[in-house]
Structures are given as structure tokens and as C-alpha cells.
Image: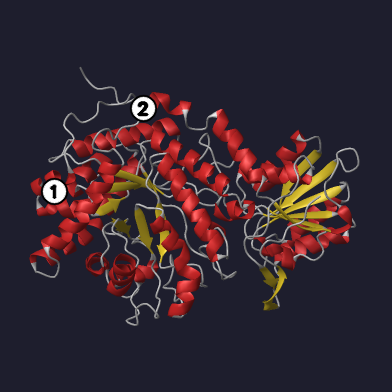
Amino acid sequence: MPHDSHSAPRAPQTPQTPQALLSRMTLEEKVGQLFVLHVYGHHATDPDPADAALNEKELGVRTAAEAIAKYRPGGLIYFGWAHNTRDPHQIATLSNDVQRAALGQSPGVPLLLTIDQEHGVVARVGAPATLLPGAMALGAGGSRDDVREAARIAGAELRALGVFQNYAPSADVNVNPANPVIGVRSFGAGPDAVAAHVTAQIEGYRDAGIAAAAKHFPGHGDTETDSHSALPHIHHTREQWEALDAPPFRAALAAGVDVVMTAHIVVPALDPALDPATLSYPIVTGVLREQLGHDGVIVTDSLTMRGVRTKYGDDRVAVLALKAGVDQLLHPPQPELARNAVLAAVRDGELTEERIDASVLRVLRLKEKLGLFADPYAAPDRVGETVGGAAHLEAADRIAERTTTLLRNDGGLLPLRPDTRRRLLVTGADPVSPSGTTGPPTAVLAAALTELGFAATAFTTGTEPAPEAVAEAVSLAGAHDAVVVTTYDVADGGPQQSLVAALAATGTPVVAVAVRVPHDVARLPEAAACLAAYSWTDVELRAAARVIAGRVPPVGRLPVPVPRPDDPGQVLYPIGYGLSY
């Protein structure tokens, strides 16, 4: 009988041990297990023409199934921009189809399907899946139970989609407010607090049967450069690294984390050769393997990032990462070039087959631990029983309510009451939305406030409001009882700062809601009230609306300090700060 791809396929009949599988693999099949590739399209065998063309350009094949047959990869990573994550039923069906393609190849090794679903500002799977507060918001909530529960919900929904590996949590300690790449993806600036939350998140993913990945080793928290576009340097001494960066990773290893992801950063105190950590034997093997004792899987951050490509070519990057001690090569920009370079390195003696075997065995053991040899499949027709379920959505709202942080409330402006300040203008920034948002932050926040009894009107000015947009917002403010402004990374002298000042000058009270870093409060002295929401996803904006309306008290506390903009050495709002009603 032909198989229905929309129901759960039968599990493999004779699960095999990792060692038995390894003994049957050719060198090419072993090397394939070290790669985690991306493919384009929402379907494994029938992609849209544009996706097929992209696959042809980057992988030399037209479909995901053909890529699996060609490269025999150990895993795939799903992205929204690669059109892998259209809706839960489609994702589960895609997962089953690519697993079937992998198991149809000799010797029949299931794929480890992976994703970056950190939540908050990084989410590849959107609604109707449950969207949860991100790391810094959870850090503001301060509850390990909430962190664990959020991870358990996220993990259960991923597993229902056939995804068994999440590249989370971030174990980076965000000690640099100017960090452009980590920011709210970190739980905070306190090493011990970050360590506690990292542990709780790992526990939650484990409860859901999902492999967590502590990232970005040896710690990406004190950079002013984005490793997606350049190669950052961390100038901590070894003693500073031990005190600031290492504790969350030590905690993750003590919690039995399955995977550690490397960072494309230079840390001279750990490797004076100035190689990116991903390519550094002293860091990957010397520190992570030998000193910290990690014997699980080590995966690179995406090899498409400029931080790992500035010093060596894409062929050498793959070889050097394996020589450093890495097990999995994530998302190489030229998979065929990288694979051939690794094969050539083995044949030329630069890499031994025993070295390859050690990494393959770690990957296979992780797959066995996750149950992939017994049953790697999802049940597409049943995803709605788990993904976006009522209990999960209610839990997300409850958790988010405990994260919103009130930083200023001059004159007791908040909470607003519909009987005294009913007409609200909601204006401000509209950053590019992560998956799962239902519209610009101004529209989402206005809708949430309207549901709470206000007459809220949305007018988006953008993250770089033009003078005409500022003038229009000022004109509208006069007809309203209060203005709620969403802000996103406010710069000194920038147009968002000008917008808030102009609105406040009308005499209409202004409430600012920082939808990314809480540091905006330091640059908005004219705003009578300031809240930190830590993200612009629906769940966090709804929580901010309930705090504004006084339906729930503000109980979040800053997990990072907010310094003076003109004197970063002076702290305006310390860790743990937060007002209450």
C-alpha cells in the first residue's frame, strides 16, 4: 500500500547501535554525517521553481531529497527565509519526507533536524505555534520555573514537528550594552543568574525530549562587532573569562547539555594565535573538551558568517574546524567544496579517519539518545494537539506578564484607566517582525489596548521616523489622552529621540515601551513612563498592554544595568531595578 505522507510513517524495523552503523559506513557517508545543511522549499521533492533554482545554485540539486542523496548529511537546519516553515502541518510533513529520504539511503541513518527557535526576537516557526518570551525577558522575570516551563513548551512543539535539536539557550553573559548581536538573546549581565537560567532551559528541553545547545562558546557577550559581518575580538583576561564568561557554560555541562555551539570570535587570552574560536584547537579541544570535560557534540555556528571566513577560505574552514575538535559543520556556504576538502584532508593524512570516526560516533549517539533510531517521525495530522494548544498559549501569556519591567513612572501616570484616559495614540517603531507576529508592534499594541477598554489608534512612524511622520504623530497626539510610543534601540540625537521629545512637548503624557534593549529609557527623559518589553512579539506586547492598563502589576526586574549614555561607567538603573504599582 502506498504511504500517506500526511500521517506518521512506520518506525524503522531494526534500530541499530551507533557503533554498528559506523562500522558499515564508507568514508563519504561518515563525512556526510558531520554536515548540517540547509535546503530551500517547503516540500522535500516538489519545491517551487524559485526554491528549486536556489537549491541548484547552492547545492547542485533541485530538491531536498536530492540533496540528501548527494551529501548524506547528518542533519538539516530549517529557516523561514529558506521557506521551510510555512505552517506546522507543512513542517511536520517536510520532516517526515526528508527522514524518509535519508532512511532510503544505505546504511539508513535518520537525520537530526535542527532549528534556531530561541523565542523572543529569534523565532523561525511562527503562529499558530506558541511564541514565548525571549531570554532577556525571562531573565527579567527571574523565575527558573518559568524558564524551564517555556523550554518544555517550546521543545514539545518542536518535537511534534519532527525537530529534535534546538540551537538554544544562549549562555552568553551580556556584559556589553553595545553588543549588536547578542543583546536580548542573553538572559542578562550576571554570570550566576545566566547560569541558573541556562540550566533551567536545558532541563526544560530535556523534559520535552529535545537536544539543547549551549552557545556561543567561549562567550559572545562582550563584543561590539557582529560576527555575522566581521570577526569580533574579546579582550578579557583568562581570569575575567573564568569569572564572567565561563560560569554559564560550566553550568550547562553540569546539567548534561548534549551540544555546545562555538562562536566565531577571537579570544587572545585563550588562543594567542588569534584564530576564531570555531577553528581553535586550544579553545575547542584544550578548553572545552579537556579542561571543562565536554564529551558531547560540538557544532559550529553558521559557517556562512563573515566572522569565520575572514582569515581562511571556505574549504579550509571546514577542515580546520574538524582539526580544532568540532563534530558538526553547520550551514556551510559551499557544501560541495567543504565536503570535498574534508575528504581530501583525510586522504592526504591531514585528518585521520579515526578523528572522523570519533565525531561521527558522537553524532550517532546523540541521535540514538533522542530516539531517532527507534522513531524519527512526526504525526502531521496530530500537530494541532500540541502546537499552539490552549494550555501552551495561556502559559506563554502568564510567563510574559511576569517579565515586563517598569523603569519610570513620573507622577504615577501608570496604570492608565479607560475612564480617565480612554483615547490612546499608539505610535513609534516598527522593526522587522520575527515569525509569529500579527502586524507592526504599534498595531498589535493598539489592538491589545482596545481589547482592554481603550480607544486606541495605531500610527506607525518607523524605526527612523522622517520629519513628516513626526509632524503627523504630533498632530494626532492632541486629540488623544495619552500617547504610547514603541522604541527600538534609540540613538542619541536620532529621530526616535526627536519623536518622543516632540510628542511630550504637546503636553499629552507619553508612555515609552522599549521593544528591544531596555537601555532606551536612558535616552528618553521626556517620557513620563517607560517600560521594557524586551521584544516586539505579540505575547510580550500583550503583556505590556496589561501592565499599562493595570490588569497585572509590573514585576519584571532589570537583568542588565542601564548606564548613562554620556558616561557608560555610571549606572542609571542597576541590575534588579524595577518599579511596582
| Amino acid type, residue under disc 2 in the picture | Ala
Residue name at image x 71 percent, y 38 percent: 447
Give whichever of 4, 466 is nearer the camera.
Answer: 4
502 to the left or right of 174: right
**Quadrant of residue 63 within the rendered picture:** top left
Q: Is residue 276 above or below residue 97?
A: below
Q: Where is residue 161 in the image (x, y as percent from the top left)?
A: 39, 35
Circle 2 crowding by C-alpha within 10 Å: few under 14, some 14–19, many from 20:
many
* Marker disc for residue 22: 1
Q: Residue furthest top?
A: 1
Give whichever of 169, 96 is nearer the camera.
Answer: 169
| Amino acid type, residue under disc 1 in the picture | Leu
Residue 226, visible in the rendered structure: no
Residue name at image x 77 percent, y 50 percent: 484
Of badges 1 and 2, nearer the viewer stands 1
Q: Position of residue 92 (x, y in %)?
A: 37, 33
Dot 1 or dot 2, earlier in sequence: 1
Question: How far apart are the alpha carbons under marks 1 and 2?
Answer: 29 Å
Q: Residue furthest front?
A: 254
**Quadrant of residue 3 within the rendered picture:** top left
Residue name at image x 35 percent, y 54 percent: 259
7 to the left or right of 455: left
401 to the left or right of 580: left
The N terminus is located in which quarter? Answer: top left
**Quadrant of residue 41 within the rendered picture:** top left
Q: How many marks?
A: 2
* Marker disc for residue 227: none
Q: What element carries label 2?
A: loop
Residue name at image x 58 percent, y 56 percent: 136
Q: In this view, does 249 lie above or below 202?
A: below
Residue 342, visible in the rendered structure: yes
Residue highlighted by disc 2? 379
